[in-house]
């Protein structure tokens, strides 16, 4: 078996390259409490806190179309399980330049900010 070592990877037809360490088109790990702040990311230019449990992640390089998949998760410090919804509290449709999501509790559906929020986007870059 051979080993292929590369620093960046670019699919045929894409104008942006991906770092090998970030196989997803984009991912982000951020603090959602207090002043929301990105801890680490790939292909994420900014984070916007739209209100409690309501966030926008803007891509550095756009997605080819809005038909990508996003997975969200997080760590809530309380005893309540958390759920995530693609689109913010106003249920914004997916965009090629950003994705929005809302974090809310299982019981009562209250929006919340967590110490750790995670998101990964899989799809084609423009």
Image (cartoon, grey):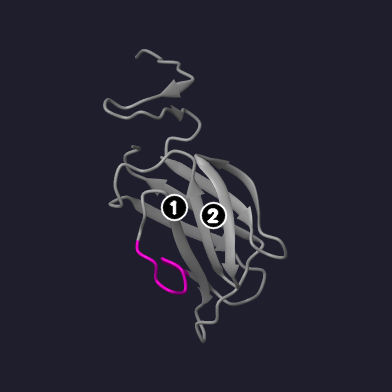
Residue 90 vs 66, above or below: the answer is: below
* Residue identifier under label 2: 118
Mark 2 Cα shell of 10 Å, populated few (<14), some (14-19), many (≥20): some
Q: Which residues are magenta?
A: 84-93
The percent position of residue 15, horizontal first and vertical second, equals 36, 28
* Residue identifier under label 1: 98
The percent position of residue 116, horizontal first and vertical second, equals 62, 58
Compute the Cα span from label 2 to label 1: 15 Å
Q: Looking at the rendering, which quadrant does residue 87 occupy?
A: bottom left
The percent position of residue 50, horizontal first and vertical second, equals 57, 67
Q: Residue at x 52, y 44 (%)?
A: 44
**Count of numbered circles in the view:** 2
Q: Residue at x 31, y 52 (%)?
A: 66
Q: Residue at x 39, y 71 (%)?
A: 91
Q: Earlier in the sequence, mark 2 or mark 1?
A: 1
Q: Residue at x 36, y 25 (%)?
A: 10
The percent position of residue 70, horizontal first and vertical second, equals 39, 54
Residue closest to the far bottom: 108
> In the drawing, does residue 79 fall left or right of residue 7?
right
Mark 1 Cα shell of 10 Å, populated few (<14), some (14-19), many (≥20): many
Assess whether mark 1 and mark 2 are in contact (beta carbons under 8 angstroms).
Answer: no
Residue 54 vs 56, above or below: the answer is: below
Eye-nearest disc, 2 or 1: 1
Query: In the structure shown, which secondary structural element does the residue marked by tag 2 occupy?
Result: strand
Residue 63's tag is none
Q: Looking at the rendering, which quadrant does residue 48 occupy?
A: bottom right
Residue closest to the far top: 2
Q: Quadrant of the C terminus?
A: top left
In the foreground, 64 or 111: 64
Kindly report the secondary structure that dominates the magenta region of the rendered protein.
loop
- 90 in the magenta segment: yes
């Amino acid at each position: 078996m051979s080993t292929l070592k590369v620093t960046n990877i670019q699919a045929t037809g894409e104008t942006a390259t991906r770092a090998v360490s970030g196989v997803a088109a984009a991912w982000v790990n951020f603090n959602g409490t207090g002043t929301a702040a990105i801890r680490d990311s790939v292909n994420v230019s900014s984070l916007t806190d739209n209100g409690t449990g309501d966030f926008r992640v803007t891509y550095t390089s756009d997605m080819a179309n809005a038909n990508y998949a996003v997975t969200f998760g997080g760590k809530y410090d309380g005893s309540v399980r958390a759920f995530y919804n693609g689109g913010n509290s106003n249920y914004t449709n997916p965009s090629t330049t950003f994705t929005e999501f809302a974090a809310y509790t299982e019981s009562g559906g209250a929006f919340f900010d967590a110490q750790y929020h995670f998101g990964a986007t899989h799809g084609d870059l423009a």
